[in-house]
Amino acid sequence: MNLKALVERGLVRSGAAAATRATVRGRALILAYHNILPDGERPVGEASLHLPRRAFADQLDALAEHCQVVPLAHALEPPPSVGERQGRPRVAITFDDAYLGAVQAGVDELRRRGLPGTIFVTPGMLGGRSFWWDALAGPAGTIPEAVRTHALEQCRGEDEAVRRWAGAAGLALAEPPAALRTASEEALLAAARGASVTLGVHTWSHPNLIRLSPTELVSELRRPLDWLRQRFAATLAWVAYPYGLWSPGVAAALGEAGLEAGLRVSGGWIPRRGVDRAAIPRSNVPAGLSLDGFRLRLAGIRAR
């Protein structure tokens, strides 16, 4: 659906169309996904993170129609000055957490269209493990804010600590099915084989980096980078901050850990005039976002 169609459907004011084209022309956007649910898989865990495969496929088709999908490493480069795609927004696709559904169903959809993508990996959580937020999400697929705050602050976002506290507090912990757990090393190897997939750092154990000591912080950043480089040629020395949480102290540790850039999970479009490589913005794609809403994000506008 183009801007004219969005105007006709009442999703965009007619006077905004020309201005919108100018707003996104030549700009870059990094999309942040988490999991892609295989066909027929029931949506459990934290609902906003698990996007059905059909919805993901529709979004990829919209991207191919209106944008130039580029490898993540190219997202910060200047736009092309010539060529038929000169004015198209550039979009990079990323996945956090290395869920099995994303590594298999998500990568399969990328491969079908010849599109690149990047998976941010937490090596210490690989091998079919679940994350605390999926285990704690109730039938509604949400976590009470007080529970989330305690998990991130007092438990430092550390999976084992959160589970111990939740058990002591009498909170129910439910284990999700395989597609909503982490991939194996073998599944990652298969995903990175001939599919234009690169791998990046998502720390070693997915803690809240802000709550760590300087020594713990460098270890959480350096150790996964070394692990990935030993196994995967297509490793990008970029980190996606767990929970999107970072600070100047975290940013200062990137260089010591051998990392070149850090990604948030918010912030939208990359600024035209430079960006802090330690705090690169992304646009999170929640599972509940409609296809029309997704198209509006690509157009750089909001619905009325």
Image (spheres, rainbow, N blue to C red):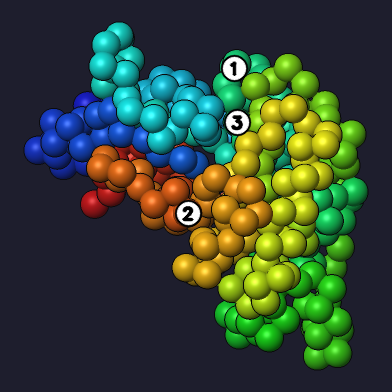
Identify which amino acid the numbered label 2 is placed on.
Ala
Instruction: Name the residue carrying label 1.
Output: 113
Residue at the outermost front position: 256
Name the secondary structure under disc 2: loop
Identify which amino acid the numbered label 1 is placed on.
Arg
The residue carrying pointer 3 sits among few (fewer than 14), some (14 to 19) or many (20 or more) residues within 10 Å by Cα, namely many
The residue carrying pointer 1 sits among few (fewer than 14), some (14 to 19) or many (20 or more) residues within 10 Å by Cα, namely few
* Nearest the eye: 92 or 113: 92
Q: Earlier in the sequence, mark 2 or mark 1?
A: 1
Name the residue located 59 percent from the left edge and 25 percent from the top edge: 116
The residue carrying pointer 2 sits among few (fewer than 14), some (14 to 19) or many (20 or more) residues within 10 Å by Cα, namely many
Name the residue located 52 percent from the left edge and 70 percent from the top edge: 249
Q: Earlier in the sequence, mark 3 or mark 2?
A: 3
Instruction: Name the residue carrying label 2.
Output: 278
From the top left corner, tell me how far across and down residue 45 is, in percent.
73, 60
> What is the C-alpha distance between the residues marked 2 and 1?
31 Å
From the top left corner, tell me how far across and down residue 185 is, in percent.
87, 39
* Nearest the eye: 142 or 87: 87
Point out the frontmost of discs 2 and 1: 2
Residue 271 found in image quarter: top left
The answer to whether residue 224 is visible is yes
Identify which amino acid the numbered label 3 is placed on.
Gly
Instruction: Name the residue carrying label 3.
Output: 117
Name the residue located 83 percent from the left edge and 30 percent from the top edge: 189
> What is the C-alpha distance between the residues marked 3 and 1?
11 Å
- Image quarter in which the N terminus is found: top left
* Nearest the eye: 216 or 33: 216
From the top left corner, tell me how far across and down residue 142 is, in percent.
63, 69
Name the secondary structure under disc 3: strand
